[in-house]
Image (tube, rainbow, N blue to C red):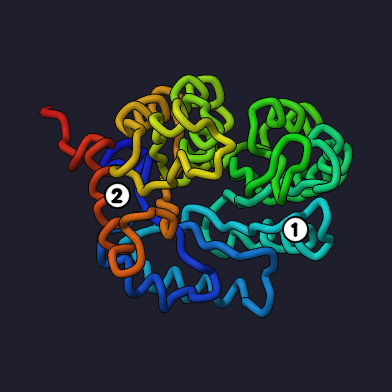
Amino acid sequence: MSRIDHQDIRIGTLAPMASGAAYLRQVVPHGFESFELTLWQYIGDVDLEATAKECLDVLGDQAIISSVGIYGNPLQDEKTAADWAVLIRSAKHFRCDVVCGFAGALEDRPVDESIPKFKEVFGELAKIADGEGVRIAFENCDMGGSWERPRWNIAHAPRAWEMMFDSVPGQTLGLEWEPCHQMVSFIDPIPQLRKWVDRVYHIHGKDATINWDIVKTEGIRSGIPSVWHRTPGFGDSNWTDIITILRKGDFRGAIDIEGWHDPVYRDELEMTGQVRGLEYLKACRGGAYVPNPR
């Protein structure tokens, strides 16, 4: 993917797979360049091949499908694990090579005790992905869990990433990274991204705002919220720095905005916020492409 016309890093948004072409038809005119199509837990009655064709027909040459995602617990739910395999084999219909989702968790025990099951499930899924020319990217969301009692997803801390990637060698497994989930854990996302950029296969465009006044005066166990998920452009992160690190790390892919979380730009202002986030990220990328003089 060339850097001409910013083909190396596209800016897009998430879209529900079940709504398919109908949703894309409404939002692609806003200027989104890519879409991650998402499923919650299962494929269900979605006809993947037909949905892919309908979506690609709507997008034409305006945008691409950057990735497809399934968000469930494949370490405890065999149906979710089976649907991961189906989605990996179906990625080619969407003309994408990244499948995203949660790594799963054994929720009644610490993260490290999930690793043998992770190796069993994703060792096999990695083999399927290798055969399909697909990469797997894990979202770094904690889903309200902890190290001692994870929920849905063990891939929420760098220590877990190291265990996961050691258990399934190779480059097939990587990250669907975003600064927000790291900031919720009070991790500085910038040095983390510099360290892990080679394993980042997809970006969720979601930021966070940390209210340090609350952290400093009330702590993090008072029941008073101290961190809010934000649409890019409204949070604390400098996305120019993030995109600089991605480009220096030779990242090729998409930043797809994960909306429906911002405490201000929501409800009637949801798409207003997302389009502002789109414009902000395009500016952070460098603005409109300008060719060099010959």
Residue 84 is left or right of residue 135, and the answer is right
Residue 189 is left or right of residue 291, and the answer is right
**Real-space CA distance between mark 1 and mark 2, rounded to the nearest whole angstrom:** 33 Å
Quadrant of the frame with the C terminus:
top left
Residue 12 at what x, y percent from top left?
Answer: 37, 53
Q: What amino acid type is highlighted by mark number 2?
A: Gly
Q: Residue at x 69, y 67 (%)?
A: 42
Q: Is residue 55 above or below residue 165?
A: below
Q: Is residue 35 above or below residue 121?
A: below
Mark 1 or mark 2: which comes first in sequence? 1
Residue 125 at what x, y percent from top left?
Answer: 77, 49
Residue 10 is left or right of residue 18, and the answer is left
Q: How many marks?
A: 2
Quadrant of the frame with the N terminus:
top left
In the foreground, 236 or 132: 236
Residue carrying label 1: 85
**Around disc 1, counting alpha carbons within 10 Å, would you say few (fewer than 14), some (14 to 19), or many (20 or more)?**
some
Quarter of the view holding residue 158: top right
Q: Secondary structure at mark 2?
A: helix
User: Badges 1 and 2: C-beta atoms under 8 Å apart?
Assistant: no
Point out which mark residue 234 bears. none
Q: Secondary structure at mark 1?
A: helix
Residue 57 is left or right of residue 270, and the answer is right
Q: Residue at x 81, y 51 (%)?
A: 75
Q: What amino acid type is highlighted by mark number 1?
A: Ala
Camera-near label (1 vs 2) is 2
Q: Is residue 110 above or below residue 204?
A: above
In the foreground, 248 or 283: 283
Q: Residue at x 40, y 29 (%)?
A: 212
Residue 246 at what x, y percent from top left?
Answer: 42, 29
Q: Residue at x 68, y 64 (%)?
A: 41
Residue carrying label 2: 277
